[in-house]
Image (spheres, grey):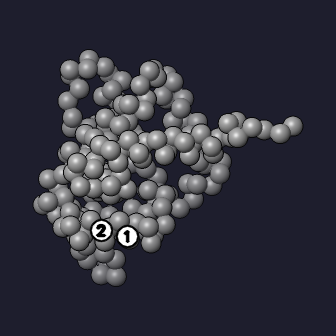
Amino acid sequence: MRKEHSEFLGFWIHRLRTAIQTLLDQHVSELGVSASEALLMTVLSFQGSSSLVEIAGIMGLTHPSVLRTIDSLEKRNLVKRTPHPNDRRIKLVTFTDEGRALEEKINQMLYEVNQIAVKGMNEEELDQFFSLIHRAIVNTGGDKHMPPLQAIPPSRHSVEDTGSQLNSERKGRL
């Protein structure tokens, strides 16, 4: 039996990724960064100074792709590379003061895009959604080069005005 393209997981994951990246690009463009740059800066925000290999693993991207993004951010003085304290062959990517100034705004915009994407989903549905995505990543071997993701700390953004525990628990997930 022939399956229609709409029944393939990859089709829907690609559509979701494209929609989220487009929405994130629209949000962060006012800050002068792309969605890819914003995501890399979010990795630094939560992981701290990181090597190219660590960033590429977390983002699931190739080293050359991440290197181009780092180069672009470095040219605009948003990140800098510093020698690793124990291994001078490794360079750590870290925020500059200018990059640190954008960190909170970028994290807030990423949170807003995330909230748009999960609108109408309850906590149980979200838990199942993330669990199933994680299982599919493991099943396809997509986690082989990715270090275990640390639990993302609660966001520093206030959600008291939403009155939603779900919103505060889901901050940072994307």
Q: Give the answer, above or below, for where 111 lies relative to 43.
A: above
Could you tell me if residue 47 is visible in this image? no
Q: Is residue 17 above or below residue 85?
A: above
Location of mark 2 (residue): 72
Residue 92 occupies which quadrant of the picture? bottom left
| Numbered label tally | 2
Identify whether 73 is placed above or below 1.
Answer: below
Q: Residue 154: give x, y in percent of width and height.
A: 28, 37
Q: Position of residue 8 (x, y in %)?
A: 69, 40
Name the residue type under label 2: Ser
**Identity of the amino acid at label 1?**
Arg
Furthest toward the top, the residue is 163
Asked if the residues shown at circle 2 and circle 1 are in contact, with their CB atoms under 8 angstroms apart, the answer is yes
Q: Residues within 10 Å of mark 2 (few under 14, many from 20)?
A: some
Q: Residue furthest bottom?
A: 89
Going by the image, does 154 lie left or right of 12? left
Q: Who's the residue at 59% across and 39% down the image?
A: 12
Q: Which mark is residue 139?
A: none
Residue 68's label in the rendered image is 1
Looking at the picture, tell me which residue is in the foreground, 87 or 62.
Answer: 62
Give the structural element (helix, strand or loop) at label 2: helix
From the image, which quarter does the C terminus lie in?
top left
Across and down, in percent, residue 164 comes to: 31, 19
Q: Quadrant of residue 171?
A: top left
Do we see residue 79 in this rendering? yes
Q: CA distance from mark 2 to mark 1?
A: 6 Å
Q: What is the secondary structure assignment of the residue under circle 1? A: helix
Q: Residue at x 43, y 29 (%)?
A: 118
Residue furthest toward the right?
Answer: 1
Name the one closer to the observer, 63 or 57. 63
Residue at 42% across / 47% down in the picture? 21
